Every structure is written in structure tokens, then in C-alpha cells.
Image (cartoon, grey):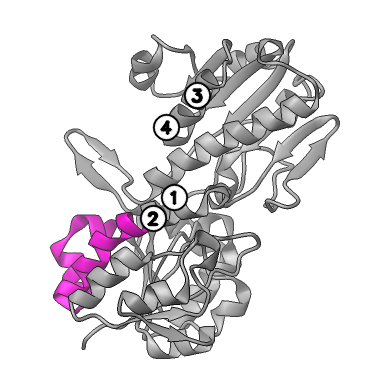
Amino acid sequence: MKYKIGIPKEIKANERRVSMVPQEVRMMVERNVPVYVETNAGVGAGFTDDDYIKSGAFICNTPEEVFNTADVIVKVKEPLESEYELIRDKHIVFSFFHFASCLPLLQAMIESRTSCIAYETIQQSVGDEMIFPVLAPMSVIAGEQAMISAHKYMEKEDLTVDDIDVIVIGAGNVGRSAAEKARELGYKSIHLVDRNLEKLKSLSHHFQVYEMNDGNLRELLHSKYKIIIGSIYNIGIRAQKILSNELLDLIPDKSIIMDVAIDQGGMTEYSRPTTITDPLIMHKNVKIYCVPNIPSAVPHEASCKISAAIYPYLCTLISTDDLDAAVSMSAEFASGLNIRDGKICHDSLLSMLSLL
């Protein structure tokens, strides 16, 4: 079997990214892999159909044509309900899935008997550390853009950087990039909270750092206006409600919570997915920003980075021309496989079986 790759247009609200840009499409075509792109799939990110045609891709007029023709579907965001019926057992779907926050999606993918490669669980060993090579570049962008958006909201309240504490919950890629952007914007009072003491120690020369616990959060949340960046990530499971209702009530009016963990269900009881055009949930006089596709704010940059990050794993698949062989050959590739032939095959999702 020779795989054919399909790139559908993203249909999630305000999603302007495209999963593969013409550069990586050209490299696939040069490897004799046919690529089928839905018309206007790249327009939001600055890539025209003509750009893809020049890269050797075929343009399809409808999503149905893409899904019917291709065996490997490459997306950015999780399939939505209108796409469920297009996904069949012949498909291998690459995407951000975040199954833990959407039981109907998990059920639909199991019933379709498709194979799902989830970007958010792909891990790579670098020295003694495990990194997330596809998730990481999107997390960096999300952290930067979350801080930029929060800053703009606070300016609308006529507040200056001197009036505001920045609290970053989670010192991973999102948290570190948010904290660095806050410093770049002129904030002086920047606090990082995490459970990993070694990670905090490495950041303590630039920021005030705190071990994650209710006592420290309680101490940090009262008094001055707050920008709170919530960026906890746990592989394949729902986000903990770190900001309990009791803690929320401590946050001063006019503050804003940027809930970057919304893909995993969010960090407050009030969190639910919103959109870039209608991003806020109000809790009393505190704003909660719950946009699940923040990197779409910079679609060209984000598309180029996700395309480059995905490409090696597509190469692993096409070089073997067999999913099982790819899984056996590459532990990195295997770490992304969440569902195979109607069965969950990633340990982080096994706890969800009881909910189906």
C-alpha cells in the first residue's frame, strides 16, 4: 500500500492554521507521496491554492473528496462532529485530539475504527528529559500570545504594568514563554508556580518562584490586580481544577485568567471553550479567557512550525508504508498512537474506558 496524504481545511471556529505548508508538501511530493489539499485550506495562514499546486499537490473542492481519496489525514485541531462521518477505518488521522476533554470524540474515533496519532502525546527523549516536539512550539506561541492578550485587556482597564502581578501556574513551555513575554512587556512582579522544584530553581534568577500548593496560591491571589496564566499540562488526562471556587473568590476585580489548559478541560469550574471572537467568561468581575486555539492568532508562524514538527513523523510512516512497522520502528511515533482498530492503545486514556 502506498499512502496518500490529505489536508482538509480546518473548520473549528476562528482556526486559521493549516497542518502542512507548501514547503513540507513539496518534500513529501519529492518522496513520491501524493498530497491532496482542500481548496483554501491554507488561505488563513497566507498560503494560496496556487502555492500548493506549485508544490505538487492536488487541490480538492470538498472535504469529502479529501477524505475519500487520502489514507493519511493531517489536521491541526481535533475532528469536529461534522467530520466524524468522513473518518473511516482506512484512515490514519494526525491531529491534536485532547481526548480527555471530549468523550464524544473519543467514542466516535473508536467506533470509526480509525487510527489516531495525537500530537500532544508524542514524546522525544533528549538527554535525561522527555520533550513534546509537536506540542512544544505551539505551547511557546500560546504562552506568548496569552500574555500579549492579557496585557491588552488590562490596558483597557487603564491599568499599568506597575499595578499588576503576573502569576504563571505551570513552568513548562507555555509558562516560561508567558513569563518571558511579561518581562519583555515591562512587568516587574512575575511569579512562577510549579510542582517541579528543580525546574523552578533554574528560573529563580529571573522570576519569583513558588512550589505549587493551596497555601502559596492563596498567598499570591489576593491584593493587587492579577494576570493569571494557567498552563498545567498532564499527558492525556483532564486538567486539574487548580483554581478552586474558593481561590477564585480571592482574585481582585478587573483581573484576568488566561486558561491555556482549556484543551484539557480548563483549570476552573467555570472554564469552557470559547472563541477568539468571543473569548471571555465572566466570574463576578474576573475575566476567564478560554480560547483553545490561541496559536491561531499568528497563523502563518504557527502553521510553519507545526508543519515542520509533524513532517518527521509522516516520514516515519511513509518510509515503512505500514502503521505497525512505524510503531515498532520508532518509540516517538508509537507514543503518539492513541487509538488503533477501535481500541485505546495509550495508557493515559485507559481510565476513560469506564466512561464510555
Residue plotted at (35% across, 67% down): 22
Instruction: Name the spot of residue 11 as percent of width and height, x first.
Output: 60, 70
Can you see residue 312? yes
Instruction: Name the disc covering residue 301, or none.
Output: 1
Alpha-carbon span between mark 1 and mark 3: 20 Å
Can you see residue 92? no
From the image, tell me which residue sits under label 4: 172
The amino acid sitting under disc 2 is Cys
Whether label 1 touches label 2, CB < 8 Å: yes
Q: Most prominent secondary structure in the magenta stretch?
A: helix
Instruction: Name the spot of residue 184 as percent of width and height, x first.
Output: 51, 21
- Position of 313 compared to 63: left or right? left
The amino acid sitting under disc 1 is Glu
Q: Quadrant of the N terminus?
A: bottom left
Instruction: Name the spot of residue 130 as percent of width and height, x first.
Output: 27, 40
Quarter occupied by residue 343: bottom left
For numbered disc 1, what is the local secondary structure? helix
The amino acid sitting under disc 4 is Gly
Q: Which residue of the protein is positioned furthest toward the right in this rendering?
A: 284
The amino acid sitting under disc 3 is Ala
- Position of 105 compared to 279: left or right? left
Q: Which residues are magenta?
A: 306-335
Alpha-carbon span between mark 3 and mark 2: 24 Å
For numbered disc 2, what is the local secondary structure? helix
For numbered disc 3, what is the local secondary structure? helix
Q: Quadrant of the C terminus?
A: bottom right
As displayed, is residue 37 above or below residue 299? below
From the image, tell me which residue sits under label 2: 304
Alpha-carbon span between mark 4 and mark 1: 21 Å
